[in-house]
């Protein structure tokens, strides 16, 4: 194992323990990704852990901050195992790459072919996907009553696969997937159409129109602090559309600001971030958290 990788992970853990004035922890978990310095996941998990009586430590393993290449992913996982982590959350750009580095996939993670939660259990790695359920819960509570005959989604990566499953498991009749990587979009469209028996098409983002769409989902990282901007041309959006974004830092993306200015109903990525954490917390600890308290922790962390 690379000494540099080990030093990076140990330093991140030591820093978090020190910031919490802790010498040990009952539960140690981490978030693996890039550009995640603004994540509120540590606050959500640690505050809920404290509320239920656990010494809980949540460590950001930011490949950008640690200056690690993507190929170091398996070494970071191995180092987390060696340090006694109970599990890992996984975000952009590793949700699909990590599939090849676990021993077992939950049924949902297998169907989606993407992981955002890994349990590290006595030498066995179990991959789960809580994103799909989290998005579905957020959508149900935040966009109740919207038309969903046709939905256009931008992004066919790990997060996009999860949101697409959530949409098609609910009464979405037709889904249009837009991704600059057409091979990836076409593969996902084929899997989804076969699984759900519904109309799923892959279209390049520059070719898509929103003329017959009821709503739009942004399942790309565009809009994050690290990737500012819009996933499509603003002229395509109309007031009759609803807009859902999975980006949650910042909570108010440029896409959502424009959509609200047009009068669109909107769904920020904060809901998905909170609800996926609710299920992940239970997987990590075996304790069902209070969703209302998780919402409170998330808002307080702002």
Image (tube, grey):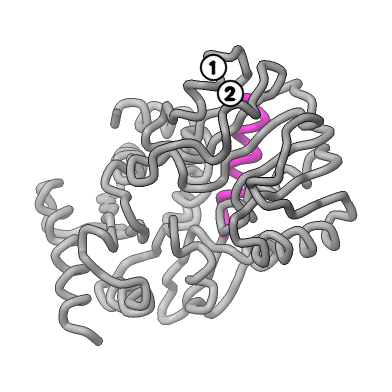
Callout 1–callout 2 Cβ contact below 8 Å: yes
Magenta range is 129-143
In the image, is 22 to the left or to the right of 108? left
Q: Residues within 10 Å of mark 2 (few under 14, many from 20)?
A: many
On the image, the x and y values in percent for residue 91 come to: 44, 56
Which of 30 and 151 lies nearest the eye of the viewer? 151
Instruction: Quadrant for the C terminus, please.
Output: top left
Where in the figure is residue 52, as x and y percent of width and height?
Answer: 36, 41
Residue occupied by mark 2 = 266
Q: Residue at x 42, y 81 (%)?
A: 123
**Which disc is residue 232 wearing?**
none
Residue 61 vertical position relative to residue 207 in the rendered view, above or below: below
Q: Looking at the image, which residue sits at the far right?
A: 197
Give the structural element (helix, strand or loop) at label 1: helix
Of residue 13 and residue 94, the one placed in the foreground of this image is 94
- As for residue 290 lying within the magenta part, the answer is no
Please say whether residue 53 is visible from this viewpoint.
Answer: no
Q: Which residue is mark 1?
A: 260
Taking 183 as reference, is 39 left or right?
A: left
Considering the whole magenta stretch, tell me its main secondary structure.
helix
Q: Classify mark 2: helix, strand or loop.
A: strand
Circle 1: is it few (<14), some (14-19), or many (20+) Cα within 10 Å? some
């Amino acid at each position: 194992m690379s000494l540099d990788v080990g030093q990076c992970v140990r330093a991140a853990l030591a820093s978090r323990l020190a910031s919490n004035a802790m010498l040990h922890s009952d539960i140690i978990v981490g978030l693996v990704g890039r550009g995640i310095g603004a994540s509120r996941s540590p606050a959500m998990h640690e505050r809920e852990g404290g509320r239920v009586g656990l010494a809980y430590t949540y460590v950001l393993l930011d490949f950008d901050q640690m200056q690690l290449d993507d190929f170091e992913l398996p070494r970071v996982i191995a180092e987390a195992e060696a340090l006694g982590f109970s599990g890992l959350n996984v975000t952009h750009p590793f949700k699909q790459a990590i599939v090849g580095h676990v021993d077992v996939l939950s049924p949902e993670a297998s169907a989606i072919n993407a992981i955002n939660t890994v349990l590290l259990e006595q030498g066995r790695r179990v991959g789960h996907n809580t994103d799909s359920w989290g998005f579905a819960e957020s959508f149900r509570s935040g966009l109740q009553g919207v038309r969903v005959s046709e939905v256009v989604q931008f992004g066919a990566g790990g997060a996009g696969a999860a949101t697409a499953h959530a949409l098609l498991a609910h009464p979405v009749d037709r889904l249009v997937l837009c991704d600059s990587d057409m091979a990836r979009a076409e593969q996902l469209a084929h899997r989804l159409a076969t699984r759900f028996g519904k109309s799923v098409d892959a279209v390049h983002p520059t070719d898509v129109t929103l003329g017959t769409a009821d709503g739009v989902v942004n399942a790309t990282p565009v809009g994050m602090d690290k990737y500012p901007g819009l996933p499509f041309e603003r002229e395509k959006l109309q007031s009759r559309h609803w807009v859902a974004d999975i980006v949650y830092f910042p909570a108010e993306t440029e896409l959502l600001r424009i959509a609200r200015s047009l009068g669109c109903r909107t769904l920020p990525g904060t809901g998905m971030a909170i609800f996926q954490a609710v299920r992940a917390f239970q997987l990590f600890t075996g304790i069902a958290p209070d969703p209302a308290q998780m919402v409170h922790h998330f808002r307080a962390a702002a």
